[in-house]
Every structure is written in C-alpha cells, then in structure tokens.
Image (tube, grey):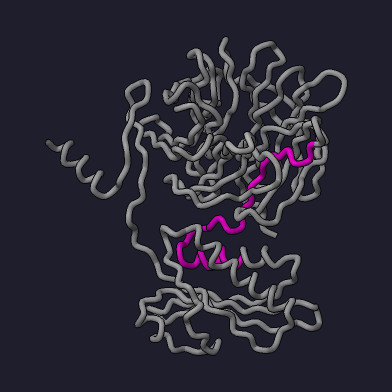
Amino acid sequence: MKNTLLLSFVFLFFPFGLSWASNGQMIIEIGEAALDKKKIIFQRPYLAEKFDVFEAKLIKEFHSIFSNDFSFYKKKFFIIDPKNEPVSDFDDKNFELWTNRQFKFITRYLFTKNIKKGAINFKVELIDTYNKEILLSEKGHFFSRNLREKAHALTDLIFQKIEKTPSIFRSKIIFVSDMMSKGRRKIKELFSVDFDGRNLKRLTHHKGIVISPSVSSDGKKVLYTLIRTGKGRKNLNLYSMNLKNRRHRIISSRKGINSGAIFTSDGRKIILTLSHTGNAEIYEINLSNQRLRKITHHFGVDVDPDLSKDGKVLTFLSSRSGKAMIYLADPSGKEKNVKRIGFVGQFNATPRFSPGGNEIVFSSWMDNSFDIFKIKKDGSQIYRLTKNFGSNEEPTFSPDGEFIAFSSLKLRKRKRLSVQNIYIMDRDGGIKGQITSNIGYCTTPRWYNPPKI
C-alpha cells in the first residue's frame, strides 16, 4: 500500500513513462514538471546619445545576448518581453512600477560612445526590485570583435548574483567535423563554438582524421587522436594541443590504438586505451616521466574511459560480457572493484560522468537507433532522455551539470542523405536547440569552460 501511494504521488507530479532493462531495472522516461520561476526583464537599452546604423546594430546584438542566454534556463526564469515595456531613465529609482507587476529582477543598460578607443561604452545594472537593491553594476566597453565575449561574461555575472552558482554562458563546445573533406578524401578536424553555436573556430589543420577529443579540467589543453591519411602505415596516435597558442605535440605513438584519452583532474596524468600488447586495455600515463600503468586486464576489449571529478571512480566500455556495456572500476589498481552497471539495449557507448560525479550519461543502441540515457553511479536509477529524435550519441555534460550536448543523426528521406549536428538538451531531456548547421558531419562534442582572461 505504501509503495502504491508513493508511485501515485510520483506520477501525479512528474509525468513519465516506464520500461525495463535486460536485468529487470526500471527505465524512467522523463516528462516536464511545473516549477516556480523567477520573473526577469532585460530592459530596452537607454541610449545617452545618437549612434550610427553600425553602432546601433552592435548595441542591439549585445542586448539580445542577455535574453538569449537566460532562455536556456527556462526552468529557473520567466523572461519578460521588453517590447511593450517603457524605457525609463537609467537613474530612475521607481522600483514600485516593477514590483507591482511582480517583476523580481530588472537588468538595465546605458550606452555611450567611446570616441578615443573607437568602441562603445556600457553600464549594466541588475536590480532586485523587491528589496530595492542594486545587486550588480558593471562598466566597460566593447568592440565588434569582442562583443559576444563581453556580453556572455556579463550574463554569467548576473546569473551568479541571482543563483549563487556559475552558468554555462562562458562555456564552449569542442567537436569534430568533416567540413574540410575534398571529394572522396575524408578530412576530419577539430572545431570549437560558444555554447550557443556562435563564434565557430577551426582548431586543427592536420588534413587527416581527428577523433576522440577531451579537454583538461582547467580548459587549457585538449587531447585527441589523429589518423594520418595518405600512403604508409595508419596508426592512431595521441596528441595534446594548447588551446591558447594551438601548439600540439605527440603524447603516445605506440603501435595500434592510442585513443579515448582523458586528463586526470590535476592534469599530470592521462588515462587512455592502448593496444600495443595486442588487446585493447586501459592504461594510465604519467606525463612527466611517461611511466605506464595498467588499469584493466581482461581478454575483453576495454575502451572509452572517463573519470569522476574526485578521480576515485573510472567508467569505461567493455566487451567482457559479450557486447559493449558500461563498467565501473577503481583506477588506483589493476582490475580493482570492477562492476557492470550497463544493461540497456543491445550495446552501450561513450559513458561520461556528470560534474558532480554522481551520474553517468551514455548512449545505447535500442529500437534501431542510438538514444541517450542517464544512470546513477551505483546503477540504481536509469532515465531515458531521448526518443523519436533521430539517432543520438556522444553525450557530454555542461560544466554546471544542467545541460547535455550530443550529436544527432537525421535522415532526409527525399534526398536519401543523412546529416549529423550537435544539439543541446537540459539534464531531463528537454531539447534546447541545434547548435551546428551546414558545417559538415559533426560528432563527438565535449563541453568545457575556457580559462578566464
């Protein structure tokens, strides 16, 4: 009776569907619940002087970034459209105008010309109207070349003042695209975009095939595997690149596979798959002395490692059960505390820890396509996050753990072609949008925070 009442309560407030994994584990398909949201308005800009057409366009773009950024957090904020709202004097302290309409937070803007630097000056304030308090007041200037960077930094400051935690607004996503391919010659290079899909940058120029990127926890370096094209032996060599100056070097070029590498949280070691002894196993490499330590030792194929933030738990894929499934292990020893937690679908792929380390997101082949799932670290709860949305793979958590980026393959029936792009959803499976378009076949997104300048 007690369990029946509990399930009734859950179904009433959290709409979802249920199915079961091969081991009898319940799979929860999440719906969206009603949440209490904070009302916020990004007031139309107050222009202290006349601007030309180009300057006005820059100001409009700068201002639009604020509401667009916060729209990703629709479960936390209700964004008021400022079109029909008055533009008051920047120094107006009549907060009752807003509190009477239950607007909790107001962000207002003042723009002037910076003739000396050829830039636009801004002053941005965040106001708590209920407490009649200015929570944030920031001054500065921007050029067209750094407009988006400045705006994202400000929206992050505003978010932190309200939520007391960082947002995704400064974050970037690294991914692989084949957009540089020429005819039958397949070329895959590494690219990056801001979290909102803007500011695309090409990071590598190898003219080969780049796979399996992974960014260090400080956002300064990226690991990736390169397969050279052309004549000669094709080896999967591991590279490291400094994201600031784009300098790269080979980390491991042992015979066979040198791939799926990740940094430890301190950046002093890497964990990766090597096959130089014949079978694919997971190893640790000390970057200072190149010392090698074996973590897995099994006749099955072990690949795709990822570490919890504290470094105490390793997740990886293994064929030791006969097909690729998710396993856990203690990386401090060899075959230490190995445990299978993946039982969903025909096989699993690309497990990745949440920033807090309590959850793992992964893809699984099920119903003739890949879909994204989320599972508790101990395997106790599993949630299906995508369904009937193409074939979805390679999930990666945002730095704050609130969102997941993934690649999604869509079939175009009329043209008999397929296209694969990077999408973002919230941690409960609500699709937020597509962030790549018309830049080739995009795969393997990895989300990170760049270092602050």
Q: Height in image: 358 above or below 251? A: below
Q: Residue 120, image x and y in percent?
A: 72, 78
Please tell me whether residue 333 is drawn above or below residue 83 in the rendered image.
above
Q: Position of residue 340 (x, y in %)?
A: 44, 21
Would residue 220 be seen by someone viewing this image from the given angle? Answer: no
* Front residue (pair 265, 169): 169
- Left or right: where does residue 268 sit relative to residue 329? right
- Along the horizontal axis of the image, is 234 left or right of 418? right
Residue 16 place in picture, x, y as percent: 32, 42
Above or below 77: residue 184 = above
Q: Quadrant of the N terminus?
A: top left
Residue 155 drawn in magenta: yes
Viewport quadrant of the C terminus: bottom right
Q: How many marks?
A: 0
Residue 13 in sight in this render: yes
In the figure, residue 420 lies in which quadrant?
A: top right
Extreme-left residue of the structure: 1
Res 46 → quadrant? bottom right
What percent of the width, then of the height, locates residue 343?
Answer: 42, 23
Q: Tell me the residue at 19%/43% (across/down).
A: 8
Magenta part of the chain: 153-181
Closest to the observer, 104 or 439? 439
Q: Residue at x 45, y 46 (%)?
A: 427
Give me the residue at 65% from left, 42% from top. 216
123 and 334: which is toward the camera = 123
